[in-house]
Amino acid sequence: MTTTTSAPAAPDLHPLLSERWSTRAFDPEHQLDDETAGRLLEAVRWTPSASNTQPWRVALALRGTPEHEVLFGTLMGFNTAWAAGASALVLVAAERTTPEGKDLRWADLDAGQAVAHLTVQAAAEGLVVHTMGGIEVERVREAYEVPAGVEPLVVLAVGRQGDLSVLDEKTRRRELERSRRPLSELVLPLRGASA
């Protein structure tokens, strides 16, 4: 039972956005080929950034490799219950300070844009992405050569949508419940403006 769901009440969005889904059910048979992996990383590389600083840093780990085993070992809690089926894990970090000590105030925003670009490219490739903040940052630092001023942020699970029936009932329900706050809660009004 493979199921997908579109964003409710979002008919004008491009399908790459409206059908984007942070699944926890990955196809464990799917292998990410080198060409597709390269395009995902190119999407990251061509992300816009403040003053073209390009402050993101990434590490790609394909399932079945020693790199994957190491990166998977940095995941925390519930993430370990489902992320093993993903075809690849991608570590994303942000260079918050240059080697010269200059603060890069927008680094996390730019790294977030890199995640978004990879996510949209993945959707165009027929893949799904789930972002995980539950990582052991110190274990990441032990495993990777993370320079001073660079902060590991998230790990992305990337792969092909799998069968939701492999998930437990609670997790399966979470998969099918897509909701967002109304725009009225997200758009900041001008101070003192009447409603």
Image (cartoon, rainbow, N blue to C red):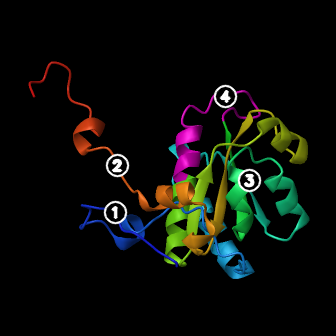
The number of numbered badges drawn on the structure is: 4
Q: What is the distance, in whole Å, between disc 4 and disc 1 at their CAs?
A: 41 Å
Quarter placement of the C terminus: top left
Specify start and end residues of the magenta stretch as a single range: 96-113
Residue kind at label 1, given as amino acid type: Ala
Give the mark, 2 or 1, whose residue is nearer the N terminus.
1
Q: Secondary structure at mark 4?
A: loop
Say which residue appears at 87% left-offset and 55% top-offset: 70
Q: Position of residue 129 (x, y in %)?
A: 58, 63
Question: Which residue is nearer to you in this view: 170 or 41?
Answer: 170
Q: What is the distance, in whole Å, between disc 4 and disc 3 at their CAs?
A: 36 Å
Q: Is residue 177 left or right of residue 138?
A: left
Say which residue appears at 80% left-offset and 47% top-offset: 74
Question: Which residue is nearer to you in this view: 178 or 11?
Answer: 178
Mark 4 vs mark 3, foreground winner is 3
Residue 195, compared with residue 175, is above or below; it is above
Q: Which residue is mark 3?
A: 80
Circles 4 and 2, Cβ within 8 Å, touching? The answer is no
Q: Secondary structure at mark 2?
A: loop
Res. 180 mark = 2
Res. 7 mark = 1
Which is the main secondary structure of the residues drawn in magenta? loop
